[in-house]
Amino acid sequence: MVLKVSQEVREAIEAGRPVVALESTIIAHGLPRPRNLQVAQELEAAVRGEGAVPATIAVLDGRPHIGLDKEQLERVANEEGIRKLGHRDLPLAVASGASGATTVSATAQLAALAGVRVFATGGLGGVHRQWTVTQDESADLGLLARTRITVVCAGVKSILDVPATLQRLETLGVAVAGYGTDRFPGFYLSDSGHPVDWRLDTPEQVAEVMRAQDALGGAESALIVANPVPEAEQLDPEVHARVLADALRACEEQGVRGQAVTPFLLDHLVRHTDGASLSANLAAVRGNVRLAGRIAAAWAGA
Ligand code: PSU
Ligand code: MN
């Protein structure tokens, strides 16, 4: 088998115990070093704190790994020039023996292949502002339209065109629910300014929806559980608006394109908010990882 599933994760899957998949692009390309490694370890510990097994996913020397040991996690965090792999990159990386961190799309594909149903991240990719010029829409959306996985996220990244992304998710037929809220979260912000049609308030309710998805058949699509960053930990909305406008301008002026756009914008926000955007991002991811642990437990107990 092409996958290398760690012993701990394999045993948990076989025994039907709760497992949470974690992506690695946020570690390698979404957060500054050396904080990124610490965060990767904290996130795994947070999953364990909820009684679930963390399965961080990355490709190392052409082998997709589901569950990383300490050295492997260090490689993902520190290796110079480690690639960013979307799902379309997976066969190329595997066949050529390359190493890379996996985005939401690649992580979701590999998690589903390994039989892991619950996945936590920060914010999903989506439709970029300027889409009419660049046609830049994250591959996350298309992949989630045809992968049976539950993704816990703080909405989609606020650097994106949020209403256009919500529209695309509707068109693609991906289920979206707010967790404990009727508002679609805004990644660094608790509220993106847009409503969400469905609300779930407990992990058991989420597991109930997952069972209904399986019972109903149809397209193998995902369930997005949009969990807001607590208001006390969000980025100041005024700072957010101002610095994001600068970041988008800098991105355009410097001609940043393709895969580089998201890391460029996230990094710009970290550097120009005195770390406040980093704190908000981390608070969001932490909350998502914990909730995913509880959802995985509810799902496993079903
Ligand atoms: N969430 C974060 N930080 C990130 C990402 C998500 O808090 O860096 C990553 C995810 O891996 C997501 C990717 O899939 O950004 C989207 O990149 P793109 O826009 O190039 O598809
Ligand atoms: Mn893109």
Image (tube, rainbow, N blue to C red):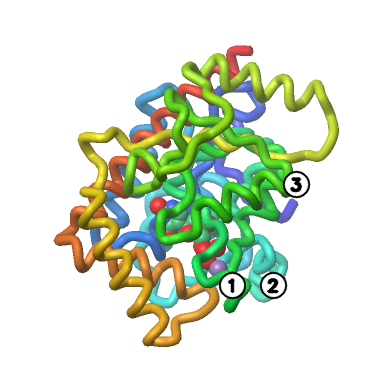
Count of labels in the image: 3
Query: Which residue is tagged 2?
Result: 92
Is the residue marked 3 within 8 Å of ligand 1, measured from its CB? no
- Between 244 and 56, the residue placed more toward the observer is 244
Side (left or right) of 96 relative to 224: right
Q: Secondary structure at mark 3?
A: loop
The residue under label 3 is which amino acid type? Answer: Arg
Of pointers 2 and 3, the one earlier in the residue sequence = 2
Q: Is residue 46 above or below residue 171?
A: above
Of pointers 2 and 1, the one earlier in the residue sequence = 2
Nearest to viewer (mark 2 / mark 1): 2
- Identity of the residue drawn at 50% across and 80% down: 257
Q: Secondary structure at mark 1?
A: loop
**Within 10 Å of the Cα at label 1, are there few (<14), some (14-19), or many (20+) other Cα atoms?**
some
- Identity of the residue drawn at 19% across and 53% down: 276
**Within 10 Å of the Cα at label 2, are there few (<14), some (14-19), or many (20+) other Cα atoms?**
few
Of pointers 1 and 3, the one earlier in the residue sequence = 1
Marks 3 and 2: in contact by CB < 8 Å?
no
Marks 3 and 1: in contact by CB < 8 Å?
no
The residue under label 1 is which amino acid type? Answer: Ala
Alpha carbon distance from label 2 to label 3 = 21 Å
The residue under label 2 is which amino acid type? Answer: Leu
Alpha carbon distance from label 1 to label 3 = 26 Å
- Between 250 and 238, the residue placed more toward the observer is 238
Nearest to viewer (mark 1 / mark 3): 3
Query: Which residue is tagged 3?
Result: 146
**Percent of width and height locating residue 32:** 28, 63
Among all residues in the image, which is located at the extreme bottom?
254
- Identity of the residue drawn at 38% across and 75% down: 80
